[in-house]
Amino acid sequence: MIGSFNFSVLPKIIFGKGKSAELPKLIKGYGDNIILVTGKESFQNNPEGEKIVASLKDNGITVNPVIVTGEPSPAIVDKTARFFREKEINCVVAIGGGSVIDAGKAISAMIPDEGVVEDYLEGRGDKTHSGKKIPFIAVPTTAGTGSETTKNAVLSRVGPEGFKASLRHDNFVPEIALVDPMLTLTCPPDITAASGMDCFTQLVESYISTEASPFTDALAQEGLKAIKKSLVTSYEDGTDVDARTGMSFAAMVSGICLANAGLGIVHGFASPMGARFNIPHGVICGTLMGAANEVNVKRLRATPGCEVDLIKYARLGLLFTGKKEGASKNYYADAFIVYLNNLVELFKLPKLAQYGIANDHIYDILKRADCKNNPVRLSPADMKEIFMKRYK
């Protein structure tokens, strides 16, 4: 029986090799004065970057550059929005990874608004955004967060009193998600692995989420098939266009899935850790994924009424490890955990203590971690077990 579900609005999606050549024409649909948000290294080291900027200028488009380094903060969003508020910007274009796209999304939302962005962040402010914004085009250069298809922008302030929080509104979905896998070819192996594990985590967590629906399950399964075919290959040979295309597809789909089914315990850990320590989001996801799913499976087996979730884990094991004659669903679920742990070793994902997390930080991380939408309720002891498996 198919139950009821909701599905969020999507951007216009333009996907495929070489599709970034359409950017000038797409921008012209809004005007010819744009903000171009990029990441310093990722864009400057991408040979396609120069081509894109040249093509924009050749088409009479005025390019106002904004460079974002690291994860976007409320301060950079407010500063940029104030600077451009009276400059009649027609469109904001973000070309980069998830942080760059989140920054562009937030800037497009705050230019028409006289306030400060922190007042609108979930869990931080008490104001509701009107949804008015400047048209926004997202052009990803990594295959990870899927921010090109979501309605939220994650902003952060890192430190002892730090936070990671979302600016969210249905209208903040990009007008256009322009996904060209060719832009990911220069992504280095470590970032390919970390962003790919973020994408992988999003697909798995939305697939096993308490808010999953047949719609999101179908999308997640297609994204996971692409992960199986493409993640390791794109890490080992970044010039493999087919693998890069598969990962770009998986990342795009993961954004759609998380927006409609939510996420689980790995991302519940990622927010408090990313707010306090300078740990790349994808590294947190990747290093915790095997441990978190191992504890999930153990707890599901001990909890009555979780057969459907265990079947999903078995399907994941079958997909990623192949069919074994006579194997049980328990075998496949366990095989999936082994597969995840092998990826951690292959990608050389570090233990968490390497990022300055001390013993006296652990309690606060566990207290702030959230397992909303996780398929099973985890106890404090379960949460600690997950963390300690990848701590030292």
Image (cartoon, rainbow, N blue to C red):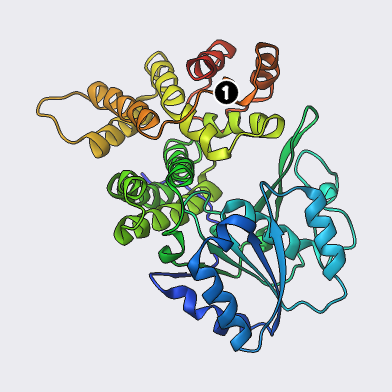
Q: Position of residue 30 (x, y in %)?
A: 66, 82
Left or right: 303 in relation to 271: left
Image quadrant containing the N terminus: top left
> Up-down: is 349 above or below 221?
above
At a point 64% along the width and 62% down the height, the residue shown is 38
At a point 75% along the width and 68% down the height, the residue shown is 133
Q: Secondary structure at mark 1?
A: helix
On the question of residue 343 being in view, the answer is yes
Q: Position of residue 202 (x, y in %)?
A: 48, 42
Q: Nearer the viewer, residue 72 or 291?
A: 72
On the question of residue 151 being in view, the answer is no
| Count of numbered labels shown in the rendering | 1
Q: Nearer the viewer, residue 311 or 276?
A: 276
At a point 56% along the width and 82% down the height, the residue shown is 55
At a point 64% along the width and 19% down the height, the residue shown is 366
Q: Check disc 1: other Cα within 10 Å, few if <14, some if 14-19, many if 20+.
A: few
Q: Quadrant of residue 317?
A: top left
Q: Nearer the viewer, residue 148 or 274?
A: 274
Q: Which residue is mark 1?
A: 354
Q: Residue furthest right?
A: 114
